[in-house]
């Protein structure tokens, strides 16, 4: 596959060649009829193909791979159901701005549009959830399309790109048409905007740094820390910005939003200036938008022009190179009263871990997991109560160490994303924190763990139900519980062992530390099944449609 | 608060480009009330749209500008001056 002057490669062989040239080492997929020529070309290539057990697992593993490494994640499936099964993972990548290239087989060109066997218009289906997409019509175009796809996936605000490859094109012989397309580099920020931003910061008495996941994508974690250190402006993070700040810093207020730290929400509500860095005013972060930070002016730093003014008017927009913008704003400030106020807020709203009773208290378990695993551990989680507990109680040294489906909220994300992350960073300890609802959505990927000997430490927090939905029904639907009971779950430890993954179940608080120690210190994959109180809720919370100022805490008797 | 607004887009003649443009317009909260397309040459279409929305057109324009098939948004030009599209004037 190394001879670039080869005049007799098929489209499929050029595809594999082009992926190798992009530096792809791992891709996730599942074969089938229309993509068989590509799987044939895969034999003998340098690519490591991970055979998942469901195409959604492939797409989400590619997301995990990309988020843990910053490289483009690649997944592949056949036409029809293979392609539609990728859709959720592609949407996940779109919503969380993850660089991904998804390759689908397609029925032969002459059959497209005839309702052929396993034909589906995946190009049409995915139009709203891709950054861009291609149908390859001529085999000689494939190398240029792959180059273009990788450049698009990475440049600016990253995202997924689809390549749909009809079978006849994959089989056709062709000469390569070379491409010199490079990913566009970000432009330097505009000087007058920098000057305006500096003035706003100088005039501000109560500024807050509002840090989102864009900081990780722009490789700007060092620059944002430098800005924080130089200015000592109190900082909050979004769900996807977690890991960019030292949780122990006295001016880091924690996560804002629906299940954030009250100190973070109250600081934002009192702010007179928000410096928004790679964040997009998501409704889970802002609560009721027109009451969010009502007295604050906004400096918005983002790679995507379309985010400016989308939900909140920006007094100053700083587009382009985030690192340069951040460095240009890094000047000392004189906001001692505000710093004192924020420190006081932080001390007033520390997490507590002294829950009464003998049941396992999930927040404490996750704090202990985080302490035992260390700040360099990658935690991939699913969606629901446990996801919020991870965000609240685990600490991360980098954004790339916290894999969470933020935008789409994809149940089933955790296990395949953990697989992708472990393959991207084999030296890292990778934990998957899931729930009894979420784990069942991609449980089949336990087979992938075993097949490749991928070491993922799985914790299933089992409250015998769909906890977050149950919590909302309790609090906002008059306790009319509807379809949230999962008390007939399978025995998760037995289930894991059926996939040849060692497992154990715990249900008492005194079992937690030994079990976590065993989990982290053992070789290979393990599953720890943790029974928790079915009635536990995530606190505090901002009720839906309410202002972040109206955050409510747990009632204690 | 609904307002009629106009947009002119020079679009690459690539597969799915029109669908992508119209889909973006609708998904971002704008109703297409009139649309005309004219092939400029082998490589491009001029697309003229009348849209209605309570949202500001500039927010849509920023979404449209991001599409890889969009060559440019044509601003401040007389609307619908092309002969083939005179009926829309």
Image (cartoon, rainbow, N blue to C red):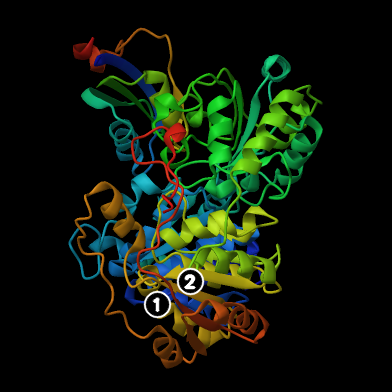
Q: Is residue A160 left or right of residue A337?
A: left
Where disc 1 sits, the SS reads: helix
Labelled pair 1, 2 in contact (Cβ < 8 Å): yes
Residues tagged by mark 1 and mark 2 found on one chain of the structure: yes
- In this view, A79 is above or below A556: below
Where disc 2 sits, the SS reads: helix
The numbered dot on residue A443 is 1
Give residue A488's position: percent from left, percent from top: 26, 80
| Residue occupying the point 32% across, 83% down | A490
Q: Quadrant of the C terminus of chain A?
A: bottom left
| Residue occupying the point 64% across, 63% down | A21
Give residue A406's position: percent from left, percent from top: 47, 51
Q: Report, in whole angstroms, how far the alpha carbon at label 1 lies from the one at label 2.
A: 8 Å
Q: Residues within 10 Å of mark 1 (few under 14, many from 20)?
A: some
Q: Nearer the viewer, residue B31 or A243?
A: A243
Q: Which residue is mark 2?
A: A415
Q: Which chain does tag 2 point to? A: A
**Would residue B23 be visible to someone looking at this image?**
yes
| Labels 1 and 2: the sequence-earlier one | 2
Q: Is residue A111 left or right of residue B43?
A: left
């Amino acid at each position: 596959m190394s001879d670039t002057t080869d005049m007799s490669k098929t489209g499929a062989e050029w595809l594999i060649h082009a992926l190798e040239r992009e530096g792809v080492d791992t891709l996730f997929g599942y074969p089938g009829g229309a993509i068989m020529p590509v799987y044939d070309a895969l034999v003998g290539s340098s690519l490591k193909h991970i055979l998942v057990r469901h195409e959604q697992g492939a797409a989400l593993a590619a997301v995990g791979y990309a988020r843990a490494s910053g490289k483009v994640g690649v997944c592949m499936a056949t036409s029809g159901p293979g392609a539609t099964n990728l859709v959720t993972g592609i949407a996940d990548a779109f919503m969380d701005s993850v660089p991904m290239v998804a390759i689908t087989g397609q029925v032969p060109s002459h059959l497209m549009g005839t309702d052929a066997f396993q034909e589906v218009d995946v190009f049409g289906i995915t139009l709203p959830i891709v950054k861009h997409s291609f149908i390859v019509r001529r085999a000689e175009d494939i190398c240029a399309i792959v180059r273009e796809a990788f450049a698009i996936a990475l440049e600016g605000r990253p995202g997924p790109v689809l390549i749909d490859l009809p079978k006849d094109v994959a089989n056709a012989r062709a000469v390569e048409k070379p491409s010199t397309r490079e990913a566009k580099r970000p432009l330097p920020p505009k000087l007058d905007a920098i000057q305006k931003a500096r003035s706003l910061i100088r005039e501000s008495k109560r500024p807050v740094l509002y840090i989102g996941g864009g900081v990780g994508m722009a490789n700007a974690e060092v620059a944002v820390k430098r800005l924080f250190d130089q200015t000592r402006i109190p900082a909050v993070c979004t769900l996807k910005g977690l890991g960019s700040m030292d949780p122990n810093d006295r001016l880091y207020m924690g996560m804002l939003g629906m299940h954030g730290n009250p100190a973070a929400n109250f600081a934002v509500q009192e702010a007179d200036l928000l410096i928004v860095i790679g964040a997009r005013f998501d409704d889970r972060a802002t609560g009721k938008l027109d009451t969010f930070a009502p007295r604050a002016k906004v400096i918005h730093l983002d790679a995507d022009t379309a985010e400016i003014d989308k939900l909140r008017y920006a007094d100053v927009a700083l587009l382009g190179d985030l690192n340069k913008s951040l460095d240009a704003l890094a000047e000392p400030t004189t906001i001692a009263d505000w710093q004192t106020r924020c420190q006081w807020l932080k001390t007033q709203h520390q997490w507590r871990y002294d829950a009464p009773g003998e049941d396992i208290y999930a927040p404490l378990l996750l704090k202990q997991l985080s302490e035992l695993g260390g700040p360099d551990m990658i935690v991939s989680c699913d969606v629901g109560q446990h996801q919020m507990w991870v965000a609240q109680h685990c600490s991360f040294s980098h954004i790339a160490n916290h894999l969470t489906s933020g935008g789409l909220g994809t149940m089933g994300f955790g296990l395949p994303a953990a697989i992708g992350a472990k393959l991207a960073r084999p030296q890292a300890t990778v934990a998957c924190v899931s729930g009894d609802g979420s784990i069942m959505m991609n449980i089949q990927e336990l087979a992938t763990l075993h097949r490749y000997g991928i070491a993922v430490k799985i914790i299933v927090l089992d409250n015998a139900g769909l906890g977050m939905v149950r919590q909302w029904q309790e609090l906002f639907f008059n306790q009319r519980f509807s379809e949230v009971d999962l008390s007939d779950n399978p025995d998760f430890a037995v289930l894991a062992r059926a996939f040849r993954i060692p497992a154990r179940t715990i249900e008492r608080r005194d079992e937690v530390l030994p079990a976590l120690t065993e989990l982290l210190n053992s070789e290979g994959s393990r599953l720890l099944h943790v029974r928790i109180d079915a009635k536990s809720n995530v606190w505090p919370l901002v009720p839906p449609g309410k202002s972040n100022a109206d955050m409510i805490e747990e009632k204690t008797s | 608060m609904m307002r009629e607004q106009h947009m002119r887009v020079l679009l690459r003649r690539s597969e799915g480009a029109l669908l992508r443009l119209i889909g973006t317009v609708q998904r971002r909260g704008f109703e297409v009330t009139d649309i005309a397309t004219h092939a400029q040459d082998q490589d491009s279409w001029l697309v003229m749209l009348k849209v209605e929305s309570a949202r500001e057109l500039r927010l849509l324009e920023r979404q449209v500008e991001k599409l890889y098939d969009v060559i440019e948004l044509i601003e401040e030009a007389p609307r619908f001056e092309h002969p083939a599209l005179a009926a829309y004037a």
